[in-house]
């Protein structure tokens, strides 16, 4: 965009930025754009001819202020800021999973450079309307699950409510803890060509966006700090604090309540938001199997036993909440949860059963409901909506199909909305026939051309024909949130999540590839600087509280440690094998036998592959081919995927650098697959380079786990997982070296030391010695070598003892099966019997292998599944 003109930034933008499309409201200029035949003329209350942009060529005051605060470099700096924005999204790991994306389930969160700016007057109108609707929806739900007066009087059709799959008969007559059914409600709204706001949809089950809009605010406010500060943009923290305080106030335990955030897990499309929101609010992020119901009370499974839970902020649709009473095939919920809710022992936000409120058909009944329940007209009108299950509404709307949107009434139909204006006469006739035959399945809404906001389009980002970067108008829809700050009281978050269509089509959907934008609400009053820090800033001391480690998080950390160590082990083994198969020792039969045995035992090659002693090249080709075949062998690729899977489940406990390292390592390893891996032309040299790179990456992962994680019980279990794997792998490798005779061969001796990652230490301490005493002293007994069996066993026992002491674990220690190395004698280990065998050494190695085999099951029973506790309790009261 040229910037060598004499005008101010605002004048330059007004001159260069295209107007919104005809029939749309132009947010940049604060005016509508005339259309030959306004497509919204049929909307109820939509009169007033839209003003022409030609009569108002200047920018609105807010946008003029924004552009004037760009700084001395003006528009020339926007490309740099856009690149910085995209880099921050990648670095922060902000993702939105798109199931239909052919490029994989994860993609970076998409956020536009410019915010949507709302004036104080605009916001006051929105705030008043949203507060009214929150009260109204809560009263509707209270009636539907209580006296059902609305159904008896016909203000709500019974078929629309009780016929909706989201209506839960199990919740009828249940008064929610705290008295409020909907602590959180979200409303999607859009502006018509005259600038008036209309409510398009309402979300009540588990509205998404509260976490993403926080990230948007953090990103955009840092890119435009001067504009954000000088334009008096309202802050968000006070509303989040009010939500948290309100939930605690309404919960059974009051201010001491333990509240958790319930997520479907890392494969949900908005999982990043769940983890981010839990971290921001200071809540424990849990999945269904983290919780259990005992005697109609809800508990969190932790390393220290079962801890009571008093409140749930759920990000899970109602039908998955309780497999005992709802969907029996659900593995996401908590068996018995509805029973705990009915008993009044747990607050759930939002109360189960609100899904029927999300039906687009409900919007058509909201005006009458508001007059009846509140005695008020709606401050924010609903987009004109007709449920075709009513004959009169059906007959009235059929002639308007060419100017309307056809939507499914029930979520189970999973049909996308259909724009009547895109249908041919034949298609319109078919849709008319469908609606006449199955009217209750269809809801018709008036078509509303969305207002358009300026967006920064970099070259090639939208496939346009414009040269270089430029500002282009795009359609926008605004999601606003009302949150409960106490019984029967709500406040509106002063901002929201703006969803932007990616091109000229008006599809503002994140699942369809849309983008988002921050929402700046201006105020003439002082900006609220409330934070989530404690109210009493003068407190002399902070009481230390250990972070709660759930059993699921502990188990995934345990396996994160195991998979990290396994990856290091098999990577080192594969490197040594390829080096030996192509080096000076390739004719050593004991060495080849040892490598073959270990490779099969660790899943690097299939058992059916001939050993290297019989077919060296076949064995080598199989080894290389299996590196990136995670579905066929438990090789390097398999264990890398294991790291990613375990890390995904505890992402909220990992630093961003740690997470990014895991994701990039897994992606790059499979992207750099050895050439010819599919046509049989395997390259061991390329594979070696690939493995060397991976070794550096896994070493960095180890550093992150060692130096960047808090030393709580979760970290101790991660460390236990690593040392358990290390002890079993190294003990089995040394035992196999004895059985095959590899340790008595010069090449095998060196390979064994290399497998223990102790080559430099060995040669520094023992010079050119190649005997068993030197080998066993360093690899078995040395208390200063973190790769020696004695050091690993001692560390493992110490970690287990600390966890058992903290958890107050009764009974025999889990470390009993791990042999104590304090009594090991080098002389005894080096003693050979009459058959020339090292009996004491072999006995010790066998004890190490057997000890780690039973340790995992014992830890799972005690700390992960709590199966011993389950035998003493029932789900019922």
Image (cartoon, rainbow, N blue to C red):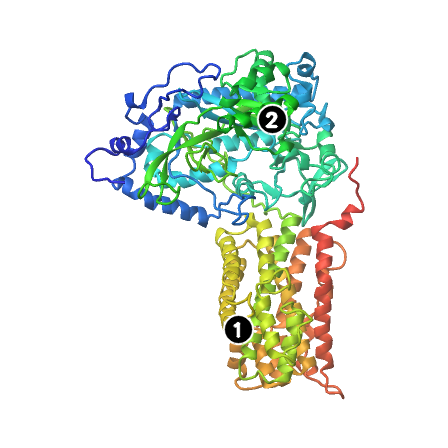
Q: Tell me: residue 230, above or below residue 809.
A: above
Foreground: 766 or 231? 231
Q: Position of residue 686 (x, y in %)?
A: 49, 70
For label 2, the residue is 359
**SS for callout 2:** loop
Taking the spot 56% from the left edge, 23% from the top edge, the residue there is 444
* Residue 731 visible somewhere in the drawing: no
Left/right placement of residue 47 relative to residue 145 reads left
Q: Which residue is mark 1?
A: 684
Q: Residue furthest left?
A: 6
Where does the image place residue 583, in percent across and percent down from the top left?
Answer: 53, 81
Left or right, residue 395 beside residue 11: right
The answer to whether residue 318 is above or below residue 131 is: below
Neighbour tally class for label 2: few under 14, some 14-19, many 20 plus, Cα within 10 Å: many
Question: Around disc 1, counting alpha carbons within 10 Å, would you say few (fewer than 14), some (14 to 19), or many (20 or more)?
Answer: many
Label 1, secondary structure: give it.
helix
Q: Is residue 133 left or right of residue 441?
A: left
Residue 328 is labelled as none
Q: Are marks 2 and 1 in contact (CB under 8 Å)?
A: no
- Where residue 439 appears, x then y in whole percent? 64, 22
For this rendering, which residue is in front, 454 or 440?
440
Q: Quadrant of residue 819?
A: bottom right
Q: Quadrant of the N terminus?
A: top left
Spatial CA distance of label 2 from label 1 is 59 Å
**Depth order, front residue of 763/129:** 129
Name the residue nearer the viewer: 778 or 534.
Answer: 778
Query: In the picture shown, does residue 863 fall above or below 64?
Result: below
Residue at the location (56% across, 33% down)?
416
């Amino acid at each position: 965009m040229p910037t060598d003109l004499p005008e101010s930034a605002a004048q330059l933008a007004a001159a260069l930025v295209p107007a919104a499309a005809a029939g749309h409201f132009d947010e940049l200029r604060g005016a509508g754009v005339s259309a030959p035949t306004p497509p919204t003329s049929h909307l109820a209350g939509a009169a007033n001819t839209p003003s022409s942009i030609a009569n108002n060529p200047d920018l609105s005051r807010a946008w003029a202020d924004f552009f004037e605060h760009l700084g001395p470099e003006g528009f020339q700096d926007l490309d740099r800021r856009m690149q910085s924005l995209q880099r921050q999204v990648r670095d922060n790991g902000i993702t939105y999973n798109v199931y239909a994306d052919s490029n994989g389930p994860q993609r970076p969160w998409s956020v536009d450079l410019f915010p949507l700016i709302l004036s104080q007057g605009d916001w006051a109108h929105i705030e008043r309307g949203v507060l009214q609707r929150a009260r109204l929806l809560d009263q509707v739900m209270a009636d539907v699950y209580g006296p059902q007066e609305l159904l008896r009087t016909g203000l709500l059709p019974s078929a629309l409510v009780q016929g909706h799959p989201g209506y839960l008969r199990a919740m009828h007559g249940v008064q929610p803890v705290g008295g409020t059914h909907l602590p959180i409600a979200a409303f999607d709204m859009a502006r018509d060509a005259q600038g008036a706001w209309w409510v398009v949809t309402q979300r009540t089950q588990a509205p998404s966006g509260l976490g993403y809009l926080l990230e948007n605010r953090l990103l955009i406010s840092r890119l435009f700090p001067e504009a954000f500060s000088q334009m008096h943009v309202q802050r968000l923290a006070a509303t989040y604090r009010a939500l948290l305080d309100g939930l605690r106030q309404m919960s059974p335990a009051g201010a001491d309540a333990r509240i958790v955030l319930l997520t479907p897990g890392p494969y949900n499309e908005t999982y990043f938001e769940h983890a981010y929101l839990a971290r921001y609010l200071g809540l424990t992020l849990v999945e269904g199997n983290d919780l259990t119901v005992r005697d109609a009370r809800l508990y969190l499974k932790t390393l220290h036993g079962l801890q009571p839970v008093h409140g749930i902020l759920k990000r899970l649709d109602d039908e998955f909440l309780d497999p005992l009473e709802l969907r029996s095939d659900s593995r996401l919920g908590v068996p018995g949860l509805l029973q705990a809710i009915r008993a009044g022992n747990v607050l759930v936000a939002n109360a189960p059963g609100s899904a029927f409120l999300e039906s687009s058909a409900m919007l058509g009944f909201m005006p009458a409901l508001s007059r009846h329940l509140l005695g008020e007209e709606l401050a924010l009108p609903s987009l004109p909506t007709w449920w075709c299950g009513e004959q009169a509404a059906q007959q009235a709307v059929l002639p308007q199909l060419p100017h309307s949107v056809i939507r499914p009434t029930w979520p189970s139909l999973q049909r996308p909305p259909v724009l009547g204006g895109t249908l041919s006469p034949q298609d319109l006739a078919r849709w008319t026939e469908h609606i006449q035959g199955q009217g209750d399945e269809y809801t018709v809404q008036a078509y509303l051309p969305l207002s358009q906001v300026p967006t920064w389009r970099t070259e090639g980002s939208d496939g346009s024909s414009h040269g270089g970067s430029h500002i282009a108008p795009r359609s926008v829809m605004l999601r606003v949130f009302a949150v409960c700050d106490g019984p029967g009281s709500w406040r509106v978050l002063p901002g929201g999540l703006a969803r932007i269509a990616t091109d000229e089509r008006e599809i503002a959907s994140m699942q369809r590839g849309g983008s988002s934008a921050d929402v700046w609400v201006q105020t003439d009053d002082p900006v609220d600087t409330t934070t989530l820090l404690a109210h009493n800033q003068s407190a002399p001391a902070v009481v230390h509280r250990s972070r709660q480690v759930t059993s699921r998080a502990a188990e995934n950390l345990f396996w994160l440690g195991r998979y990290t160590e396994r990856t290091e082990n098999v990577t080192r083994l594969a490197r040594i094998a390829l080096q030996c198969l192509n080096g000076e020792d390739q004719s050593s039969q004991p060495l080849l036998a040892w490598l073959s045995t270990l490779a099969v035992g660790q899943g690097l090659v299939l058992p059916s592959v001939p050993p290297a002693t019989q077919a060296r090249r076949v064995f080598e080709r199989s080894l290389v081919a299996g590196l990136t075949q995670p579905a066929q062998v438990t090789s390097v690729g398999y264990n890398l995927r294991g790291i990613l899977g375990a890390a995904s489940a505890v992402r909220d406990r990992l630093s961003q650098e740690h997470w990014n390292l895991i994701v990039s390592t897994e992606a790059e390893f499979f992207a750099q697959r050895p050439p010819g891996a599919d046509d049989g032309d395997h390259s061991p040299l390329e594979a070696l380079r690939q493995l060397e790179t991976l070794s550096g990456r896994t070493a960095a992962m180890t550093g992150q786990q060692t130096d960047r994680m808090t030393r709580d019980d979760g970290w101790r279990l991660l460390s236990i997982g690593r040392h358990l794997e290390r002890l079993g792998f190294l003990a089995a490798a040394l035992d196999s070296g004895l059985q095959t005779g590899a340790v008595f061969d010069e090449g095998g001796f060196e390979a064994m030391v290399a497998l223990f990652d102790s080559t430099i230490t060995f040669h520094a301490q023992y010079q050119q010695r190649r005997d068993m005493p030197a080998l066993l002293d360093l690899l078995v007994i040395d208390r200063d070598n973190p790769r020696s069996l004695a050091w690993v066993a001692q560390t493992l026992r110490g970690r287990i003892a600390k966890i058992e002491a903290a958890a107050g674990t009764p009974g025999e220690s889990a470390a009993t099966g791990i042999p104590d190395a304090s009594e090991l004698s080098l002389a005894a280990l080096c003693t050979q019997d009459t058959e020339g065998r090292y009996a004491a050494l072999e006995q010790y190695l066998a004890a190490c292998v057997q000890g780690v085999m039973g340790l995992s099951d014992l830890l799972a029973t005690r700390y992960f599944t709590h199966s011993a506790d389950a035998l003493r309790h029932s789900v019922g009261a």
